[in-house]
């Protein structure tokens, strides 16, 4: 079973070497440097035995992750984990994902958190409710598939889940990507599982544009649900 961990990064010079060292025992690290302006790319290029995909211009979360996914498929990897570069997600949790390789999507649900601002918790909870409702089969069903954390970026994709995400049109430009990718995997009828993880808030690029992106993705899921029900 070939395993890769896709790690988007932008200006993460302080942590990428340690992340690479910690992830290496569990999977092949693949860093996507999203046009960093510090020494992140130089540090990555000096580390032997890892994959590095450099971006000349910023593509943000979706562009970086999708490039990592394409690399994973092209190189014949069976499973790919997406993970943060700043130790919000800890590489020591990686083996717990690979224990569930019978699933197409394994989501690291942030059941234990540290230093997460209240506004981020509120936004994540609201997004999870919206996505579950958008993926439900009935107008009156608010629980849908019952996923507890729809916006977690620490997750594992199978080969066919990677292919499904890469071959569908995506509109998200920021954190809404995680919601949209989940919706694609669910629509395909693929298997989904959640495992509990500990999430430590370090820093964030979350802004009003990211909030609007997530709201737009959520509203499109609900609109699609209503359109299907009205046919």
Image: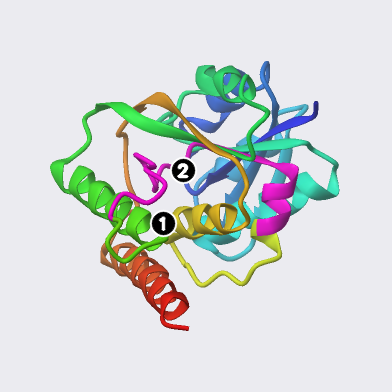
Residue 81: % across, % down = 61, 36
Q: Nearer the viewer, residue 201 or 180?
A: 180
- In the rendered image, residue 60 lying in the magenta stretch gets the answer no
> Which residue is found at the position 70% from the left and 33% from the top?
4
> Left of 179 or right of it: where is 200?
left
Q: Quadrant of residue 31?
A: top right
Residue 151: % across, % down = 39, 48
> Left of 176 or right of it: where is 21?
right
Q: Secondary structure at mark 1?
A: loop
> Which residue is found at the position 49% from the left and 60% from the top?
180
Q: Nearer the viewer, residue 6 or 195?
A: 195
Residue 103: % across, % down = 63, 34
Q: Quadrant of residue 66?
A: bottom right
Would you place residue 141 above or below residue 106 in this image? below
- Ranked by sequence position, the earlier of labels 2 and 1 is 2
> Left of 144 or right of it: where is 191?
right
Which residue position holds label 1? 175
Q: Are marks 2 and 1 in contact (CB under 8 Å)?
A: yes
> Which residue is found at the position 26% from the left and 66% from the top?
208
Q: Which residues are magenta?
A: 142-164
Which residue position holds label 2? 153
- In the rendered image, residue 143 lying in the magenta stretch gets the answer yes
Would you place residue 28 above or below residue 74 in this image? above
């Amino acid at each position: 079973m070939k395993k890769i961990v896709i790690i988007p990064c932008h200006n993460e010079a302080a942590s990428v070497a340690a992340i690479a060292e910690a992830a290496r025992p569990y999977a092949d690290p693949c860093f996507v440097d999203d046009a960093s302006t510090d020494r992140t790319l130089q540090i990555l290029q000096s580390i032997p035995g890892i994959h590095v995909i450099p971006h000349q211009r910023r593509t943000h979360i979706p562009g970086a992750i999708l490039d990592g996914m394409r690399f994973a498929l092209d190189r014949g990897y069976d499973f790919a984990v997406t993970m943060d570069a700043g130790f919000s997600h800890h590489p020591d949790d990686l083996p717990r994902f690979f224990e569930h390789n019978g699933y197409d999507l394994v989501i690291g649900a942030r059941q234990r958190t540290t230093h997460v601002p209240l506004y981020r918790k509120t936004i994540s909870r609201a997004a999870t409710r919206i996505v579950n409702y958008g993926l439900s089969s009935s107008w009156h069903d608010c629980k849908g598939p019952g996923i507890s954390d729809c916006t977690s970026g620490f997750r594992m994709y199978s080969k066919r889940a990677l292919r499904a995400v890469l071959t569908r049109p995506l509109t998200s430009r920021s954190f809404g990507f995680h919601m949209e990718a989940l919706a694609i995997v669910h629509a395909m009828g693929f298997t989904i599982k959640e495992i509990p993880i500990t999430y430590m808030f370090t820093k964030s690029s979350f802004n009003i544009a990211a909030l609007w992106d997530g709201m737009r993705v959520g509203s499109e899921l609900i609109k699609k649900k209503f359109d299907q029900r009205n046919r």
